[in-house]
């Protein structure tokens, strides 16, 4: 049985930054869909929303290995 190691502090920080970036991308695309009238652009934004949602889910799973204390 493999033992999972905790991420290093810099990996935790980088994962947190990527998670924040993807969250901002998701919110921006969702908001822009409401004011966009071009259907092709709306479809692209919807695809971005779906991809960002998947990425956030994966990053959250990865973030469970985050190291937050000096142990």
Image (tube, rainbow, N blue to C red):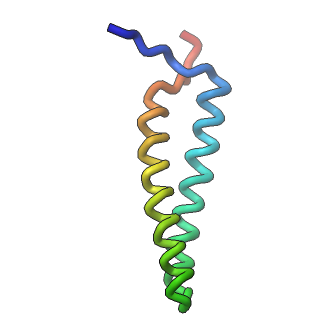
Name the residue located 44 percent from the left edge and 62 percent from the top edge.
Answer: 50
Relative to residue 61, is residue 42 drawn left or right?
right
Of residues 44 and 8, the one nearer the viewer is 44
The answer to whether 13 is drawn above or below residue 45 in the figure is above
Name the residue located 62 percent from the left edge and 27 percent from the top edge.
Answer: 11
Task: Find residue 45 and report its horizontal and vertical position in percent.
Answer: 53, 72
The answer to whether 69 is drawn above or below residue 43 in the figure is above
Name the residue located 55 percent from the left edge and 24 percent from the top edge.
Answer: 68
Identify the residue at the far left of this view.
1
Relative to residue 23, is residue 3 drawn left or right?
left
* Total number of numbered discs in the rendering: 0
Identify the residue at the far front of this view.
40
The answer to whether 2 is drawn above or below residue 63 in the figure is above
Task: Find residue 5 and report its horizontal and vertical position in percent.
Answer: 48, 14
* Quarter that holds the N terminus: top left
Of residues 51 and 63, the one nearer the viewer is 51
Task: Find residue 58 and report its horizontal and vertical position in percent.
Answer: 44, 42
* Quarter that holds the C terminus: top right
Task: Find residue 66 and report its horizontal and vertical position in percent.
Answer: 51, 26
Name the residue located 47 percent from the left edge and 71 percent from the top edge.
Answer: 46
């Amino acid at each position: 049985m493999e033992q999972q190691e905790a991420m290093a502090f810099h990996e935790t920080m980088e994962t947190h930054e990527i998670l924040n970036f993807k969250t901002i991308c998701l919110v921006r695309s969702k908001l822009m869909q409401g004011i966009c009238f071009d259907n092709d652009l709306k479809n692209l934004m919807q695809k971005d929303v779906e991809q960002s949602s998947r990425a956030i889910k994966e990053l959250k799973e990865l973030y469970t290995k985050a190291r937050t204390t000096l142990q």
